[in-house]
Amino acid sequence: AQSVTQLDSQVPVFEEAPVELRCNYSSSVSVYLFWYVQYPNQGLQLLLKYLSGSTLVKGINGFEAEFNKSQTSFHLRKPSVHISDTAEYFCAVKVAGGKLIFGQGTELSVKP
Amino acid sequence: DADVTQTPRNRITKTGKRIMLECSQTKGHDRMYWYRQDPGLGLRLIYYSFDVKDINKGEISDGYSVSRQAQAKFSLSLESAIPNQTALYFCATSDWTGLTDTQYFGPGTRLTVL
């Protein structure tokens, strides 16, 4: 069965520092991967997605992610975070039938 | 106006009560989904519907039922609520266009069962 594992439940970081949120997946078929962000008291919104092509995917708000097939990873990165990036981040893989399987979530806390 | 709306946004109820959570969308999407979010567990799929006549169980459908009243409306019911159904519930929609199939989420309903 396909699954997604987010390796860190919480990531504290200082403002303007770089950050990496780690995501590993298991899948035996073609992989379509997503990162969603959930700001406090809001629903999820799409940050970026990998469907095919270039393994480096750029998203909104300066985030990017790299698809690594050999390591079955799709880590999310930002070179310099802001206070406003404080949120929960979810990695997800699309499975048969168009459904999404989500990871457990990573809480990013940006401190001044 | 929001594309995906959920009502109510917050609800407190008692064990054994019947509860309905409603979702409406103006995106014109065919596909709609219900998820629940629990701390440390991420989002888990309860039910999904690919069109008005198509309803499918997700990974955690026990204790829940759904109704797709129209393309734009998808309701989730808890026939007899229990405390471990306390969670944040999200509705989502998507439009199948080949590879894209991005899901768009509502703001969520926070349900507390006492």
Image: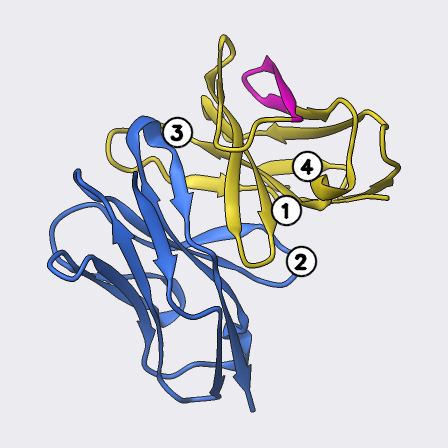
Chain colours: A blue, B yellow
C-alpha distance separating marks 4 and 3? 19 Å
Marks 4/2 same chain:
no
Q: Is the residue A9 above or below the residue B97 in the image?
A: below
C-alpha distance separating marks 4 and 1? 7 Å
User: Which circle's residue, 4 or 3, is located before the other in the chain?
Assistant: 4
Q: Which residues are magenta?
A: B63-74
Residue B55 placement, left or right of A78: right
Marks 2/3 same chain:
no
C-alpha distance separating marks 1 and 3? 19 Å
Label at residue B107: 1
Rendering quarter of residue A76:
bottom left
**In the rendered image, which residue does mark 3 sit on?**
B95
Rendering quarter of residue B19:
top right
x, y percent for residue B98: 24, 29
Marks 4/1 same chain:
yes
Q: Say what secondary structure mark 1 lies in.
A: loop
Quarter of the image with the N terminus of chain B in it: top right
x, y percent for residue A33: 28, 49
C-alpha distance separating marks 2 and 1? 8 Å
Q: Chain of mark 3?
A: B
Q: Are marks 1 and 3 in contact (CB under 8 Å)?
A: no
Residue A32 placement, left or right of A68: right
Q: Are marks 2 and 1 in contact (CB under 8 Å)?
A: yes
**In the rendered image, which residue does mark 4 sit on?**
B6
Q: Are marks 4 and 1 in contact (CB under 8 Å)?
A: yes
Q: Chain of mark 4?
A: B
Label at residue A41: 2
Q: Chain of mark 1?
A: B
x, y percent for residue B82: 77, 35
Q: Amino acid at mark 3?
A: Asp
